[in-house]
Every structure is written in C-alpha cells, then in structure tokens.
Image (spheres, rainbow, N blue to C red):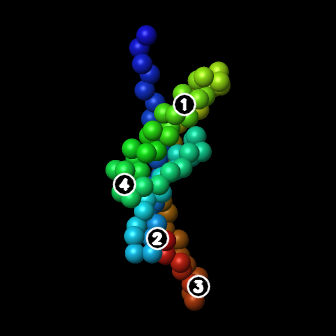
Amino acid sequence: MEKQVLNYRIIIEPEKMGKKTVYNAYCPTLGIADYGDSIDGVLKSIKDGIELALESLAEEGKEIPIDNIREQTVTTTEVRVPEGARIAFA
C-alpha cells in the first residue's frame, strides 16, 4: 500500500517569557498547539503531535481533516491605526 502524505499549515509566533523567547506553533485545521525553544524545535514537536492526532483519528475510525493549501490564500493587510491608540506589540 502506498503511503499518503498530507501537508498542514502551521502558524508560529514568538513569545517573550521574561528574558527568554519561546515559539508557539498552531495547526488550525487540527486544533493542535505546542511550543518550543526554537523554530526548529517547535516544528519537530508539532509534527509529532500532528502524527499522533492522525493515528488516533485513524484508530477511532474517524475522518482525517485535510488542509487544502492549494485553494487557500494566506496573506496580511495593512490598516491605519486611529490617532492616539495604544499599540501592544507581541
């Protein structure tokens, strides 16, 4: 049997924890989140979490949600901030 390979979007954001920066990763399609000390570390960790989630879904006979990346648009937009507004930088 041929192995199927799926691709999932992963959003990674840095977070300051005192003097240290950690990286939060989130897979919106599966609702899985994790964190790590580096981008490489958190990518490995969330990949393991995704594989575990897929194994669990398969064992339970449930459908595996897919992330159809080719049909999605991921972008940003610039907006004007109201004068005098306080901005909290993440």
Residue under pointer 4: 39
Q: Which amino acid does label 1 sit on?
A: Leu
Front residue of 6/16: it is 16
Q: What element carries label 1?
A: helix
Q: Position of residue 12 (x, y in %)?
A: 45, 55
Mark closer to the observer (2, 3): 2
Q: Nearer the viewer, mark 2 or mark 1?
A: 2
Q: In this view, does 60 lie above or below 70?
A: above
Residue at image location 49% in from the left, 63% down from the top: 77
Residue tagged 1: 54
Work out whether 11 lies above or below 63. Answer: below
Element type at mark 3: loop
Q: What element carries label 4?
A: helix
Q: To which residue does mark 2 refer? A: 17
Q: Residue at x 54, y 28 (%)?
A: 55
Q: What residue type is labelled 2?
A: Met
